[in-house]
Image (cartoon, rainbow, N blue to C red):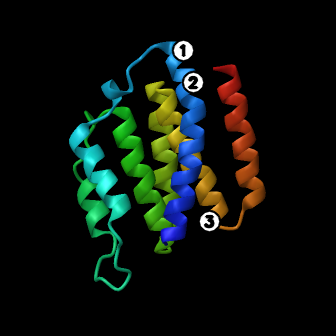
Amino acid sequence: MLFLRLVTVAITVVLLLQATAVSAQERYDYRNFEEPVLEAELDAYLLEPSDPEAENPNAFLESIVAKVTEQTPALTRVRAQSYYAMDLMVYERDEEAWELARQALEFADNSGVIDAIVEAKATIVALYYYTNEEQQGLIELERMQSDLDQA
C-alpha cells in the first residue's frame, strides 16, 4: 500500500508541476483553492501508516473526507476525494473507487481549476494502473497532455 501511495504521489507531483506552469499563466493564487486545515490533515495522512488489520483501515481518511463540504475549495476537495478513491481501490472497493474518482473529475472540470483537474485525472490514471489496465492509463495520460498543451 505504501508503494501505491508513493506511485500516486509521484504521478501527481509530475502532473502538478506541468499544471503549475499553466496555472501561473492564468495568474491565480492556488491558496484561494485550498483549505489549510484539511490540507494539513491530508499531508498527515500521507505520513501516517495505515493498519490493514484495523477494523476500519480507512477511518483516518474517512474522517477527513467527512469534513469536505460543497464549500470546500476545489484543490482540497479533489485531493481528499482522490486519496479516498485510491484507498477504496486498495481495499477492493473498486466500484466505489471509480465512482468517487469520476465525481472528483466532474467537479474539477466544472470548477475550471487546472490543478484540480490534473489531480483528478492523475487519480484516474493511477486507478487504471492499479487495476492492471496500463494501456488505458497511457491513453488517459496522452489525453491529459493534450489538454494541458491546449490550456
Residue 143 located left or right of residue 97: right
Residue at (47%, 28%) from the top-left corner?
Answer: 110
Residue at (49%, 54%) from the top-left corner?
Answer: 99
Whether residue 65 appears in this view of the structure is no
Percent x, y of residue 106: 50, 38
Residue 36 located left or right of residue 83: left
Residue 130's tag is 3
Amino acid at circle 2: Ala
Q: State the count of labels.
A: 3
Q: Name the secondary structure under disc 2.
A: helix
Percent x, y of residue 44: 29, 57
Estimate the spatial distance between the alpha carbons at disc 2 and disc 1, rounded to whole Å.
Answer: 7 Å
Residue designated by label 2:
21
Residue 6 located left or right of residue 52: right
Mark in front: 3 vs 1: 1
In which quadrant of the rendered view does residue 51 lie? bottom left
Amino acid at circle 1: Gln
